[in-house]
Image (spheres, rainbow, N blue to C red):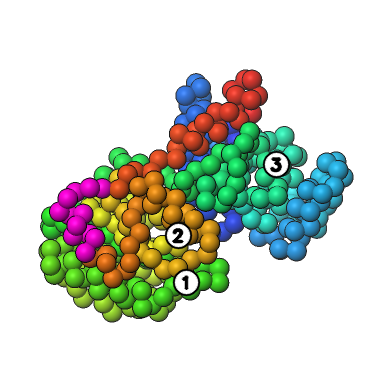
Amino acid sequence: MFPTNPSINVLILSDGRPGHLKQCEAVYLELEKLYQSRGFSKEDVACETLEMKLKTKAAKKIVFYLTYLPRLLGQWLALRCLRSSLDRTRYVELMKKKADVIISPFGQRTIAVNLPLSRQCNAKSVVLMNPRSVIGKFDLAIVHRHSNAKEGKNTILTDGAPNTIERTVLEARARELRGEVGVTADVIIGLLVGGDYKRYRMSEDKIAALVRQVKGLGESSGAEFLVSTSLRTPAHIENLLRRELAGDPRCKLLVIANERNRPGAVEAILGLCDAVIVSPESVSMISEAASSGAHVLTFEDSEFLDDEHKRFLQNVERKGYLKVVDVTQIGKYVKQFLCDGRRTKTLDDRPAIRKGLESLVDSTGTGRW
């Protein structure tokens, strides 16, 4: 139940992308835990989410005003532009918001609201990912290490994306799914498939080769497998997975997210599987898998990834959180893992995030914003 009289008000500004929203929610949960450790109850902290739909042209203007003009003039022009970009009811509703902290992913539409609104509310502003030239405008930036940002007074670096993966939740989801779908094999393989992003397109040939490797594991080692797509997965990849796996008795779960996005499916897969194969383009999915305690691997696809994604994979592989292999070697590598039992390390960025939030709270001298 939403608290009626909260002491702390947190506002999340969403850009409409589920992965980015989950990252913001993960930061909020760490903030909530921090306040509880300072004597606040769960009812003292309230969180609200608003999806922002500013036009890109207006958002760019607002960011320009706040970045390059004197503070008071920039704030005045930013609010005028924000008011003209929203209908009156929406703008009035936004200006009435009471917020002690505002969290948003980096993006023109969200930071164009986060910055002027946090100033208006006298709230602390928190941004995720890499705000680049405007990083100094925020009270706290939580930035992926592969973005080539530098750690600083208001900037903390994480190896992966913030996420809400917790072992107790995974185990509960796994128990539910095991009984529901009738998993019986000693070896269970998970497959998480993302999709297109920016100008990059997922290769059907690579996914077909990956599916062949997974099915081969079923035939050679008796493994059963659990599969889920994402909302970004293109129709031709969904059709491929349906065609190859829907009738396979060893495929105990096939979730096509765009048709029926089963809540908790990814958590159940991560909690139940010995090894999890994740497509390489999703920082969020890979971070969740690497934080779960499962053995995590992905496949090489240099034509599919931009430089930033390549740096992310190189960093997390170097630190032992996952293994990157040629797609045709997935089956061989999983068999090797099953023989020697050596798992990848578990990723945990929560201490770094907690440290950044503690520094921000303590900078007020009162434990309050």
Whether tag 1 and tag 2 are in contact, CB under 8 A, the answer is no
Q: Which residue is mark 3?
A: 136
Q: Earlier in the sequence, mark 1 or mark 2?
A: 2
Which amino acid is tagged 3?
A: Gly
Specify whether 356 is left or right of 277.
right
Q: Which residue is mark 2?
A: 282
Q: What is the x, y in percent for residue 106?
A: 62, 52
* Magenta stretch prevailing secondary structure: helix
- The Cα–Cα distance between marks 3 and 2, rounded to whole angstroms, is 27 Å
Q: What is the x, y in percent for residue 105?
A: 59, 50
Q: Earlier in the sequence, mark 3 or mark 2?
A: 3
Q: Residue at x 48, y 26 (%)?
A: 36
Specify the quadrant that holds the C terminus: top right
Q: Is residue 355 visible?
A: yes
Q: Secondary structure at mark 3?
A: helix
Q: Residue 303: which disc?
A: 1
Nearer to us in this view, 121 or 303: 303
Nearer to us in this view, 106 or 13: 106
Judge whether residue 245 is colored magenta. no
Q: Residue at x 49, y 43 (%)?
A: 158
Q: Earlier in the sequence, mark 1 or mark 3?
A: 3
Nearer to us in this view, 349 or 54: 349
Which amino acid is tagged 1?
A: Glu
Q: Quadrant of residue 313?
A: bottom left
Q: Residue at x 56, y 59 (%)?
A: 16
